[in-house]
Amino acid sequence: MSRYFSLLPALFLMFLATGQQQVDVLIIGGGAGGTAAGIQAARSGVKVQVLERTTWLGGMLTSAGVSAIDGNHNLPSGIWGEFRQRLRDHYGGAKALATGWVSHTLFEPSVGDKILKEMADIDGLDVQFSAAYQTVEKEGEGWKVVYDKNGKKYSTTAKVLIDATETGELLPMVEAEFRLGMDAKSDTAEKEAPEKANAIIQDLTYVAILEDVSKNLETHRKKGLVKKPRDYDPKAFECACKREGGEMFGSVSDCQQMLNYGKLPNGKYMINWPNCGNDFYIDWPNLSEEEVEKEIEKAKAFTQGFIYYIQNDLGFAHLRLADEFPTKDGYPMIPYHREGRRAKGKVFLTVDHLERPYDFTFYRTGVAIGDYPIDHHHDKNEAAPEIDFINIKVPSYTIPMGAMIPEKAGNFLVADKNISVSNIVNGTTRLQPVVLGIGQAAGAMAATAVQKKQNTSGVSVRDVQNSLLASKAYLMPFIDVSTDDAAFAAMQRIGATGILKGYGVPYKWANETWFYPGRIVSEHELKQGLLDYYPKADKITASGKGATLKFLEGVFSVIDKEYDVNYIENNWKKWHIDQPLSKENELNRRTVSILVDQILRPFEKEIDFEGKPLGSE
């Protein structure tokens, strides 16, 4: 008997080792945001676990099949830029990804999953697949989550919990306040918003991937041909190949052009077509979990109907359902949710902030960027108010750090489409590269909180931003400031302070903000930019002529910054300044950014979540 009792301590320790784990950061959801958050946090040196229901990483990028990137083509920020480069390496260059006309970057979902798993294969990052959380509860200052995997229960405790689910599932569970559906005009001050709030969300899509088997039809025979769904109605798809005018498509004149919208490498096609295609409305905010699952099956059947229409009514029988996903029916593991619950955060990002960023100060706290237009899908819900979303013109934009920090839940962050934005703004912040950036920022915030032993609500904005800059992530969406430029970080920092501002341009399907690094800086422009941080700059006499090194030396002395002229001269080349060293030469925005960043170091001045300086000189 004593022999068995002696085994109990060992069995107990074994249970702890296999059934319970302790990490620094726990992420629920291995989608675009969750994967990026996990990679960034682990690279920063903290211990991370990701719980993912499926067997893939990437969420909407991969598991949902939306493998055509929308936006940020000229803004390869951080992990998004790294992911894209790996895609280019895999397929043989940028042109090999430009196979369809909806995007510059299209790829097979299975390849995207493979690359993300390679990126996530790093020390400190534990990804648990087929893992479904059961309970989420506070434990001291941190969190405890119990999850199920292969019929067994496990638990993990962590200091920081991140909700990276596709629809903000954890928000009600942790009692964080959130918004859902369309906001009222009185709540957002957006002139485009409806008069009354409602719970209407965007249509979702159950995507499918088809492949061209015309070269081996004999071997395929009926493989990949779909059956006619029970409630099949071809009228639902009759206008799929025709769309006259309209800013989104120009003129879609034939069915091949419709299919080429999402043409992928290796003869495959992403079927995610909004015009009389497979968008589907589910009123999931007002349904039970069981009812939602039934509606999702209907959405999948609707997509099957569209494929049947393509194969039979349109005559593309050589396009078959591809063997792309590890599912029995060949469809993606999850639907593409365009919208979910949105946390009420430390700040609330609305259209006005996007349209006129410099009328506010949120841009100073930027941790992620986007350039896509405000694109909503509401065609399948007749009750949705008529709002001309696509013609709400905004330049490229930044997402403020406070939008990822729920106001009333400590050590809890959001990292997907669940950030604190208005319903209208969600139409652009929901896109894949933006969510990758949001996730990366959340990972940087979580790691900073752990390493500095702070609550996520107390983390320094500037600490997080510097961490992101070290990872070649953009704070400001400057289209003409490349990460390859040695002055990238300096221009990003000076841009994020607002000392030198960018110039925003709403432009087609890739909005822009220009920094103009080669443009001469006027004395007056520089003085005005410095005033928020250095009130003593008011004493400076500044004209409209170009600022010179001689003028900057005078600025530095007025602000009482101790500096040695020889220090500047000795470091001119070391700082990679490409203008000639001269007291009288007019200096451009790149050079001024470097000098102000190196001498005054305004980025070291702390700001609050709204971007206002904490104390002034």
Image (cartoon, rainbow, N blue to C red):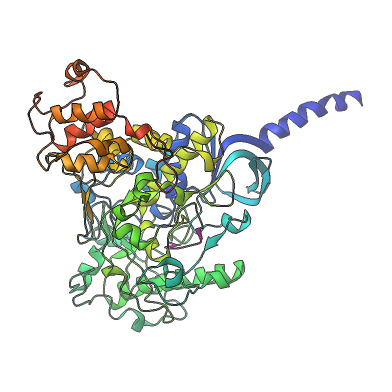
Which range of residues does the magenta coloring cover? 337-343
In the image, residue 600 above or below residue 204? above
Q: Main secondary structure of the magenta part?
A: loop
Q: Which quarter of the rendering shows the C terminus?
A: top left
Please name whichever residue, 25 or 564, is drawn nearer the observer in this view of the structure.
564
Image x and y of residue 43, in percent: 44, 31
Image x and y of residue 358, in percent: 29, 52
Q: Which residue is pictured at 67% across the width and 37% down the height?
A: 20
Q: Is residue 341 magenta?
A: yes
In the image, residue 206 above or below residue 598? below
Q: Which residue is pictured at 60% across the width and 66% down the height?
A: 289
Image x and y of residue 260, in percent: 23, 63
Please name whichever residue, 547 or 195, is drawn nearer the observer in this view of the structure.
547
Q: Does the magenta stretch include residue 169?
A: no
Q: Of all residues shown, which one is farthest toward the right?
A: 1
Q: Which quarter of the rendering shows the N terminus?
A: top right
Q: Which residue is pictured at 62% across the width and 56% down the height?
A: 175
| Left or right of 249 on screen, residue 337 | right
Please name whichever residue, 401 or 233, is drawn nearer the observer in this view of the structure.
401
Query: Where, by quadrant of the figure, is residue 495 drawn?
Result: top left
| Left or right of 545 on screen, residue 102 | right
Q: Which residue is pictured at 23% across the width and 56% down the height?
A: 511
In the image, residue 217 above or below residue 552? below
Q: Is residue 7 visible?
A: yes
| Left or right of 612 on screen, residue 584 | left
